[in-house]
Amino acid sequence: MFDLNEKISMWRGNLAQSETLGSSDIDELESHLHEEIENLTTLKLSDEEAFLIATHRLGSTDSLAAEYEKINRGVKFRHRLFWIATGVLGYFLATYLADAFSIALAVSSGSMDYNTGIVFIVSKIMFWTIVVFLCYQIYKGGFDNLRIRQLLSSFKGKCIFIAILVIAFIMLYCAILFIAVDILTQFEITKWIMDHRDFEVIEVFWGYLRLVWSVMLPALLVMLLIKLRRKDLSHEVDA
Amino acid sequence: MAISKDLVAASATPLVLSILSGGENYGYAIIKRVHKLSGGQMQWTDGMLYPVLHRLEEQKLIQSKWRESETGRKRKYYKIKKEGTKVLKEQQKQWKVVYSTLRQLWENEPCLT
């Protein structure tokens, strides 16, 4: 039995593999394909015949990819960058899992305080749950202009967006303030002499840097993924 | 008689701009229009029109917008911009020169048969 929708999604998949077509380009071609198939079926052709003729008229995957490559030079690069960023994020997730496992081991063997261990693990789980959730949304095709627009078009959506922004800003501000004050008091900048105590200070400073790095880098990578995805799907639909 | 590939490629820009100067339109309808006007002799491979449209959009001669059609399907509509109208006028002049030159040559040419 010929399943038209299945055939069309397979055809889409083939086009997507070429890397030179953005999903917006494929959507446009699919819209064309639907029109042509509808037109042909009114001429008493079966779905299968209409599909074969319509795809033939649109051109082969290779020739379409070659034509689009001339105008979409950036798309291939963005596509690769997207997967590189995903890979780096995956690496971070793997190191986090290893970290969490070693902390769990340290807690169970008694070499780490139980409460400290739990705080570490819970905070990391929370952070990575958010990261993984955002990645899932990106792969599902979320965060394109349309959805963000729809969200922002309602009053509730605007409130949520502003609330998130304010909370993020306050958190960032507190983090910077906390780190800055701590560093200033610990370093005692006016009495800057390099003795054994300063090495401890540098170690603490390094610890903070790593903390910021471990949070900021995944966050930046997620933002990069959203940006790469949004460009791909820049649809503007006026209902 | 099929029009040669080079000629089809060369005439794509003035064809698209001319059709869009009559009002906004979408890819499928543009192809059908050209097909009909040429009596089926100008046949694009359908998919090749879209890179042309995107190139014209990049050159800011036309602009596009996704919209829902009356059947509920999403369509990308294209509209000519001011700059596009200017380029179209310029191209019309050029094509008229080519056309009138060829016509004079062919009219003055003695019949070979």
Image: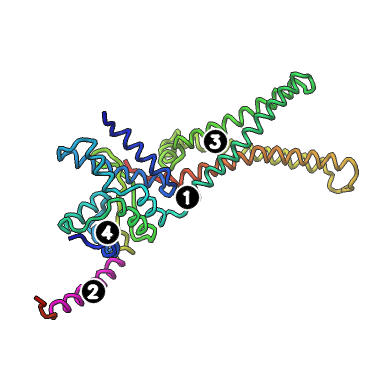
Chain under label 1? A
Chain under label 3? A
Label 3 in the same subunit as label 2: no
**Position of A89 compared to B58: left or right?**
right
Q: Nearer the viewer, mark 3 or mark 2?
A: 2
Label 2 sits on a secondary structure element that is helix
Rendered residue at 33%/64% (across/down): B83
Q: How many marks?
A: 4
The residue at which mark 1 appears reads as A76
- Residue B84: horizontal and vertical position, in percent? 31, 63
Distance from disc 3 to disc 1, alpha carbons, whole Å, reads: 33 Å
Task: Establish if A55 lies above or below B106.
Answer: above
Label 1 in the same subunit as label 4: no
**Position of A146 compared to A37: left or right?**
right
Tell whether position A83 is magenta: no
Distance from disc 2 to disc 1, alpha carbons, whole Å, reads: 39 Å
**Position of A33 compared to A14: left or right?**
left
Task: Establish if A106 lies above or below B18.
Answer: above
The residue at which mark 4 appears reads as B16
Please name the predominant secondary structure of the magenta segment in the image.
Answer: helix
- Residue A107: horizontal and vertical position, in percent? 74, 21
Determine contact: label 1, label 4, CB under 8 Å: no
**Position of A139 compared to B28: left or right?**
right
Residue A164's label in the rendered image is 3
> A137 and A208: which one is in front?
A137
* Neighbourhood count class around disc 4 (C-alpha, 10 Å): few under 14, some 14–19, many 20 upward: many
